[in-house]
Image (cartoon, grey):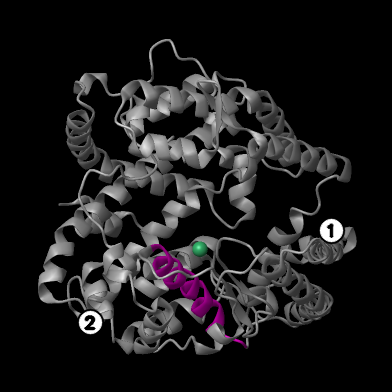
Amino acid sequence: MAACTGSTHRLEKKADAFLRSLEREIIPVYIDWNKAGFQASVSGKDEDYRKRSEVELAYSKILADKDKFSSVKAYRGNPAIKDSLIMRELDIMYNTMIRYQIDSAMMKKLINAQEAVEKKFSTFRAEVNGKTLSDNEIDSILMNSRKSADLEKAWKASKAIGTLVAEDIKSLVTLRNEIAVDLGYKNYHEMSLSISDQDPVEVSALFDELDSLTSEDFAVLKEEIDSILSGQLKIGRDKLMPWHYQNRFFQEAPKIYKSDPDQYYAGKDILQVVIAYYEGIGLHVQDIIDRSDLYEKPGKYQHAYCTSIDRAGDVRVIANIRNNQYWTNTMLHELGHAVYDKYIDSSLVFALREPAHTFTTEAVANFFGNMASNPKWITRNLGLTPEEADKISVDARLYARLEKLVFSRWCQVMFRFEKGMYENPGQDLNKLWWDMVERYQLIKRPEGWDNPDWASKIHIASYPCYYHNYLLGDLLAAQLSAYFENNIIGEKEPSYTGHPELGEYLVEKVFRPGSRYYWNEMIERATGEKLTAGHYADQYVKK
Ligand SMILES: [Zn+2]
């Protein structure tokens, strides 16, 4: 090969040696950090949480090292390095390390400001008629009350947190933008996407594509929602206000269809159902189950997550299983993350032994989690009679469509608002928020209402510029389903059960490559096309 000159070869050897020594330093601390995190989640003990913070600090010290970072930067910027795997590893190390290069005074300011806002969020209680209510209580009123005046009060009370934190968040936005400019980016939104290995232009294009594929059907569905809700609430359709949609943000499907899938899950050992399902598609999960902590305990973390402790096969799940649909979905979801981690090619270097992107592992997890509301899956895996199967299938399909369409329009609001806010933080943000809500969710802003409702969404403060990944995960899950149906089993809307070809396909095309390719290249290699909103639209938008 003419391009492979002696100097290129020597340089690549040098870069590789540098990366291997960096890896040797990182791996043991990384493993300790994950082990400490798992231990803290299971026990809930202060001393275990303290241990985790200590190890995390040691880990961040390695990544903050200025000399090591400038070596990564220098190798990464050297066009003489041709080896694509070395380049990919350098990109990933650059993205990992850059977030630790923030000026330490600024970092301290940022952490303090974030903590202050988070504290306000966790101690805030909405007040209705002189009574303080938790988020759960507000949600329950919005979901169950049919009295317009009560709904309005509860909704407005829940927005009081916005007023309380809006100025704090504006300062946070300014600070985040300063940090971004300091590190060479236009603003924090652009920086967040870039350092999480996403091209901001590419992501915006996907949101535009999905907007044009969903806007008309959503408008029709919204008419249907409005007419059902106006009947339930006994008010005119033109009187429907944001508090009538059963959710603080209209981010979830309102209950307009009758459906009670939980009855089919009661009395089943859902862990065994899920294990048998995965075994049936050729993905072996028993070793993961054996290492996991799956049932409730005092002091234990109350939700669920999956962790790959050493990126070398020690994959574990934390959960609190009950035999219902929610936990079936959750276990299918977490084991989706787990099999992804487990089957990554173990011969890759440490930095590449990760999913291609957080949203690609979310996609696989959602792909499996969705099964818990797929009528054919439920029928096969829970052993329903044909009559029961008929009964759930119509509602389940309508409900899935409603859920996805409502959520996708809400994600449009979040993505576009955050982008707009970081690009121009000085504008009237209350107006920007309601312009987005009116345009994408087709919800009317209350008359004379000028409140920072955007600030009442905790993600804006605490998990900035991440929300779009939930939607990208949904798009990819639909694309993987479509590829499997059309190109592997040639059957429309299958039960996805008992097909070892499914496991084989995912292992070979999605899991094994880890992050050796940019996510969109992995997707193209796995499905024959780059990520598109088209399959999501086929699956959920068209009736
Ligand atoms: Zn997940």
Does any portion of residue 328 appear in the rendered image? yes
Taking depth in this image into account, of 154 and 89 the one nearest to the observer is 154
2 or 1: tag closer to the N-terminus: 1
How many C-alpha atoms fall within 10 Å of the one at disc 2: few (<14), some, or many (≥20)? some
Q: Main secondary structure of the magenta part?
A: helix
In the rendered image, which quarter is residue 111 located in? top right
Label 2 amino acid? Ile
Q: Is residue 193 above or below residue 53?
A: above
Taking depth in this image into account, of 171 and 319 the one nearest to the observer is 319
356 sits left or right of 506 in the view: right
Q: Secondary structure at mark 2?
A: helix
Give x and y (percent) for residue 88: 63, 70
Q: Which residues are magenta?
A: 326-346
225 sits left or right of 279 in the view: left
Which residue is outermost to the top? 448
Q: CA distance from mark 2 to mark 1?
A: 48 Å
- The mark found on residue 489 in the picture is 2
Residue at mark 1: 64
Q: Is residue 127 above or below residue 300?
A: above
Give x and y (percent) for residue 234: 19, 25
Residue 338 shown in magenta: yes
326 sits left or right of 174 in the view: left
Label 1 amino acid? Ala
